[in-house]
Amino acid sequence: MQTIENPATNPEPENLSGFDVKHPPEPKLIDTCVHCGFCLSTCPSYRVIGKEMDSPRGRIYLMDAINEGEAELGNATVPHFDSCLGCLACVTACPSGVQYDKLIGATRPQVERNYERSLPDRLIRALIFNLFPYPSRLRPLLAPLFLYQKLGLQKVVRSTGLLKKAFPRLAAMDSILPEVTPDTFHEPLPEVIPAQGEKRYRVGVIIGCVQRLFFSPVNEATVRVLTANGCEVVIPKTQGCCAALPAHQGQEEQAQALARQMIDSFEDTGVDAIIINAAGCGHTLKEYGHILQDDRKYREKAEEFSGKVRDAQEFLCEIGLTAKLSPLTDGELKVVYQDACHLLHGQKISLQPRQLLRQIPGVKLREPVDAAVCCGSAGVYNMMQPEVADELGRQKVENLLNTGADLIASPNPGCSLQIKKHLQLQGKEIPLAHPMELLDCSIREVKLQTS
C-alpha cells in the first residue's frame, strides 16, 4: 500500500479558498473511506499517472483537507480532480461502499464555481459546452466538416502534426471526429412510429445531441428493434441534450436547464418507458432526481421521469424479444462486447447486453482482459486530458484485439469513437457496431461483412 501524501505538509496561508456551502462533499461520505487501496488497481487515471492524488483515495483525502481548511481549492488540488474520468470503477470495487460518485459529483460544481481556470482552459470548455449539447448549433457545421474530410484537408492537418503541437486539445477533438456522410444530413425520425404486429408497449426514445447527428444509424436501428418487438415509439421533437456532458463536468446550471427541457418534452406522452441507447446519457437520465434536488417545481417530476428511464438493452431483456433472430454471417461470428463504464459501473448493466447478443444464432462472445477498465473516452475527457486518454485507448484496443474477435460491440458513442481512433492508430481493421445494430440486422436478416 502506498503512503498517502499530505498536500497540507507546507502550511497554507489563512482564509484559504475552499468549498462553498452549496452541497460540498459530505464529511460522512468522506469518512466511509478507510484508505484500504482496493480502488487503486481499478482506477484508470492512477494506472496511467501513478500518483496517489490521482486515485480515488487520494482525491477523497484532498476533499477532506479542503473541507477542514487544510488545503486550498487551487492549482495544487484541482488538476487531481480534473484527472478523474468519472468512470465509477472504484465504486464497484470498494469493499466499504464508499459513494465516490456522489463525492466527485459534489466536488466538480464546486471547482467550476470557486476556481478560476486558465484562459485556454476556459476557451476550450466554452467551445465544448456551448456547442456539443445543442444539435441546432452543431447541424450548420456538418457541411463544412463534410468538405473538410472529403477534400482531404483533415489528412493534411493530421499529417503535419502542427495542430497537435499548437493546440493539443483541438487536435484531440479532430482525432475522434466521426466521418460525415450523406446519411448525416438525413431528417430526424418521425414523432410516432407504430409497433409491428400487436402493440405491447408505448415507449419514448431519446435520440441525443451528438448521437442524432453522427450516430443516426444507431437510433434508427434502435427504433426498428423496438417496433419489431411490439413497441410503439414516441420521439418528441422538443427534446434536446440529456445533460450528461455538462453534468459530468460540474456545469450545474446548464445541466439543470437541459434536464428540465427533457422532462418537459416527455410530459403527457403517456409512455411506459423512456429508452436510451447511449450509456453515458442513460446514467445521467437516471440521476435527474439528484440533479434537480433543489428545484421544488421539478424535483418530483425528475424522480418520476428517471423512474421510467431504461437502457435499450435493459428494457429488451425485461420485456423479452418476440421478433425472430437470424444469423449475421454464414458461420460462427466471434463478438467481443465492450463494457461502457456508465453502463457497467453507473447503471450496473452488464449481463443484459451479453444475454441479448447470445440470442443471435451463431454469435460466440469473447471476453477481454481488464473489461471493467475505462477506454479513456469518458464524455469529453479524451479532449480535455488527451495524453492519459490515449494511453487508456491504446490498452483497451490491444485487449479487445487479443480476444481474436471478428467484431466489437460497443453500446456508447464516445467509446466507439475512442476505439475506432486507436484501431486506426494501430493499423487494425475490425468492424464495430452498437448491439442494437446487430439485433436490427439479425431481425431484418441482413448479413454482415467482417473481413
Image (cartoon, rainbow, N blue to C red):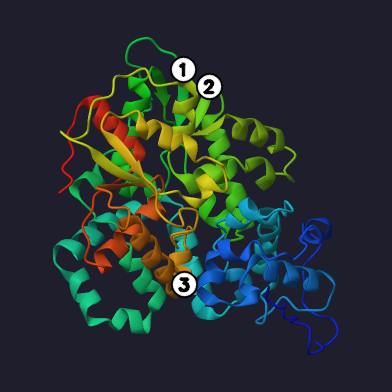
Q: Tag 2's secondary structure?
A: loop
Q: Give the mark nearer the N terminus: 3 vs 2.
A: 2
Residue shown at 48% from the left, 72% from the top: 385
> What percent of the width, then of the height, locates residue 231?
41, 20
Q: Is residue 316 left or right of residue 264?
A: left
* Residue at the spot 71% in from the left edge and 58% down from the top edge: 103
Q: Which mark is residue 388?
A: 3
Picture residue at 22% right of the left edge, 33% below the top: 328
Residue 247 lies, in percent from the top left, at: 58, 54
According to the image, label 2 marks what residue? 272
Report the side of 290 relative to 353 (left or right): right
**Could you give the CA–CA distance between mark 1 and mark 2, rounded to whole angstroms?**
6 Å
Disc 2 residue crowd, few under 14, some 14–19, many 20+, Cα 10 Å: few
Report which quarter residue 57 is drawn in.
Answer: bottom right
Q: Nearer the viewer, residue 443 or 366?
A: 366
Q: Is residue 340 above or below residue 164?
A: above
- Is residue 293 in view from this perspective? yes
Could you say whether the residue bearing mark 1 is in a helix, strand or loop?
strand
Image side of residue 51 versus residue 273, left or right: right
Residue topped by disc 1 = 201
- Residue 111 position, x and y percent, is 67, 68
Question: In the image, what residue type sits under mark 1?
Answer: Tyr
Q: Nearer the viewer, mark 3 or mark 2?
A: 3
